[in-house]
Image (cartoon, rainbow, N blue to C red):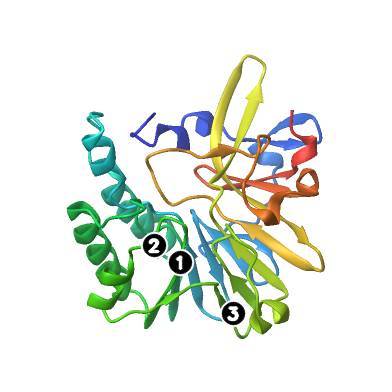
Amino acid sequence: MRNDNSYLNDYYSKAYFMKGNELLPEENFPKAFSQKGKRLLPGIFAKGLALWVKADKALVIADLHLGIEEMFNRQGMMLPRFNFSEIRKHLEKKVFPGTKPELIVINGDFKHEFGIVSEQEWSEVIDMLRLLQKHCKKIVLVRGNHDKVLGPIAKWEGLGIEKGGVLLPKSLAFVTHGREMPKGAEFGKAKVVIIGHDHPAVTIREQYKSERYKCFLVGKFGKKKLVAMPSMSMVSIGSDVKGKLLSPFLQKGIEKFRVFAVADKTYDFGPLEGLD
């Protein structure tokens, strides 16, 4: 487990991208980068590990797992408490510049513990909410499977929790954690579904070297377009997308999904089936 974020930089000290099975240098890469982020779908951009939904002026972040270190500490693992500070740094350097969100959606697993609210969670969730409130007019919390007892903290800050998800009205993007299939009319109206939960990551190989990166997956679910987000947590990189994934949204056709790896920039590696 690495906590110095070097995995975001060391492989791309000289940047490459995949075209089919060929590894090409960055100077041949399509130039599509700006402060607005890397375009994943029309009007939807990757901003670091977050999503910017332009029409709704909405920023979506997922799977922060605040307080995870205290759980490991109780189990006898002396993990330093760095997750909050590294997330804050990432937001301030990679996400907030170039965006002025009116809405920030936290798409599940804001905290880590299942059945309790630890002292670290209480402190860090409130501190994170207050940091985010400086950058937007409204915050919406979407419940993840780790958020069963998030209610007392949300109530303390005057916030509710959306159990199934929330529909962004202008883009018709439905933001849901992804552990379960949502129900209801709002999900039916959606043209795009945005999920978290699986913490997708991709392993990039070049000869004898391999490195794993957090990534976005972009594909289809039925007639809807689908974006699976990487985790914002800095404690682990995530689960390899070529392994078994958990979300019901990611059980079929994932080999056709495009992979956008997050390193110093966001890189389009094409369909998953084209990666070794």
Q: Residue at x 72, y 36 (%)?
A: 18
Front disc: 3 or 1: 1
User: Where does the image place residue 176, in percent across and percent down from the top left?
Assistant: 56, 67
Residue 42 seen anywhere in this rendered image of the structure: yes
User: Where does the image place residue 64, in percent across and percent down from the top left?
Assistant: 39, 54
Distance from Cα at disc 3 to Cα at disc 2? 21 Å
Quadrant where the C terminus sits is top right
Front disc: 3 or 2: 2
Relative placement, left or right, of 90 versus 165 is left
Q: Which residue is mark 1?
A: 143
Name the residue furthest top: 208
Question: What residue type is disc 2 on?
Answer: Lys
Q: Helix, strand or loop at disc 2?
A: loop
Q: Earlier in the sequence, mark 1 or mark 2?
A: 1
User: Crowding at label 3, few (<14), some or many (≥20) Cα neighbours within 10 Å?
Assistant: many
Image quadrant in which you'd find residue 16: top right
Q: Residue at x 62, y 68 (%)?
A: 44
Image quadrant in which you'd find residue 42: bottom right
User: Crowding at label 2, few (<14), some or many (≥20) Cα neighbours within 10 Å?
Assistant: some
User: Crowding at label 1, few (<14), some or many (≥20) Cα neighbours within 10 Å?
Assistant: many
Distance from Cα at disc 3 to Cα at disc 1? 14 Å
Asked if the residue at tag 2 contacts the one at tag 3, i.e. Cβ–Cβ closer than 8 Å, the answer is no
Q: Helix, strand or loop at disc 1?
A: loop
Circle number at residue 148: 2
Q: Helix, strand or loop at disc 3?
A: strand
Circle number at residue 37: none
